[in-house]
Amino acid sequence: MSTPSRPDAARNASPFLLGGEAEAMAAVLLSGQYGHTDVTETFEKNVAAFLGVPETVAVTTGTAALHIALVAAGVGPGSEVVVPSLTFCATIQAILACGANPHFVDVNPDALCVEPEEILGALTRATTAVMPVLFGGRAIDLSSIADTLQERGIAVIEDAAHAFGSFRGDVRVGATGDLTCFSFGPIKNLTCGQGGMIVPRNAQEAQLARSLRGLGIVESQARRAVTTSYSVERFGFRQQMSSINAAIGNVQLANFDQAQADRKKLWRAYRATLADLSSVKLVDVDVDNSVPHLCVVRVPYREAVFEEMRARGIGVGVHYPPNHQQRAFSSWYRELPVTERIAGEIMSLPFHPHMSEDEAVGVVESLKESLAVAGAQR
Ligand SMILES: *Cc1c(COP(=O)(O)O)cnc(C)c1O
């Protein structure tokens, strides 16, 4: 089986096979062991080694990783979690799943990430956690408020669903000491088909996260002990990562150098080409130290430009419709001027490793035409 090659700017994002994923999955299927197995544990060890951390905890999805991390950090009913509105709705649903209340905050329009001062201003007596979202792969440094958060017993839980492979200073995101969650969903920087991972802050938290993902059963007993019973220690979920997904992840990780190089190359092509368009602002990323995940631009008359791009067969998207304006989250609405303004400007250009640099140039060419048409309609 060979890697499919489908150069394509019609899609906004796409899973990318690096070669060998299908064979690895087939080997697991033929082995007859599909649950959490040694293959899953090998994946956990491989990711831990890649990040430079002692251990990781693999789960079914990124959303499950966030939910379990929140519970492990003691976030429960009635408590508040500070979170940017500009994120995938999964971040918010994980907070609601704990019975906690999201406290929405604004973002910096040039990075689409939350700033430390914004978090400080949102803390209340009910705050138990802050959840920065590493939008587009950008690392977030909260060290300037780390002491305050620690004194008040507030956990930092990073939603690093976009940021697998990125660096903060000298270490990878995940190895900074914060409780960190990754998604290995279909279109993420690294995919397991479906999957997620928690990087715990210490061995005790790791054990708690393992118990929480596995129905509260002590895992060594559940999997290995030759006894007639097992011990259920606490409330828990059924969210272990299947060996079928882990097998895909192991192959993706072994080839991650290529995936990250392709994303960086595509980013540089976009950045160079977009520099000619004065009315378009690329939400830039420190590409030397990050693995870019989304290519977001801010454009005038976004609705019309979006329609023109789609009419030209270009797979543009919007990441994301703000959560504080969603019906399901309206109880937690508060005014967020920056988010509300840029919500009408942001547009994500096609960005995935199936694309060539030439295609990025073609997308920007279409953007130029679309801007002209949309501008003339005004
Ligand atoms: C993808 C994503 C998630 C959820 O991950 P899943 O694996 O899809 O459950 C959470 N937060 C952000 C910012 C994401 O992009």
Image (spheres, rainbow, N blue to C red):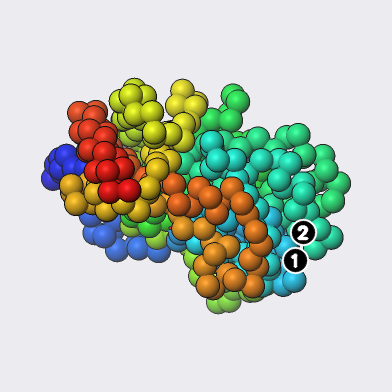
Between 178 and 301, the residue placed more toward the observer is 301
Looking at the rendered structure, the secondary structure element under dot 1 is loop
Q: Is mark 2 within 8 Å of ligand 1?
A: no
Between 333 and 224, the residue placed more toward the observer is 333
Query: Is residue 111 positioned above or below 36 on the image?
Result: above
Q: Which residue is mark 2?
A: 127
Looking at the rendered structure, the secondary structure element under dot 2 is strand
Query: Is residue 292 positioned above or below 155 on the image?
Result: above
Q: Which residue is mark 1?
A: 79
Between 61 and 20, the residue placed more toward the observer is 61
Q: Image point 75% across, 71% down: which residue? A: 78
Quarter of the figure with the N terminus? top left
Q: Is residue 146 left or right of residue 263?
A: right
Location of residue 70 by image quarter? bottom right
**Can residue 238 be seen here?**
yes
Q: Percent from the top left, x then y, of residue 32?
A: 29, 63
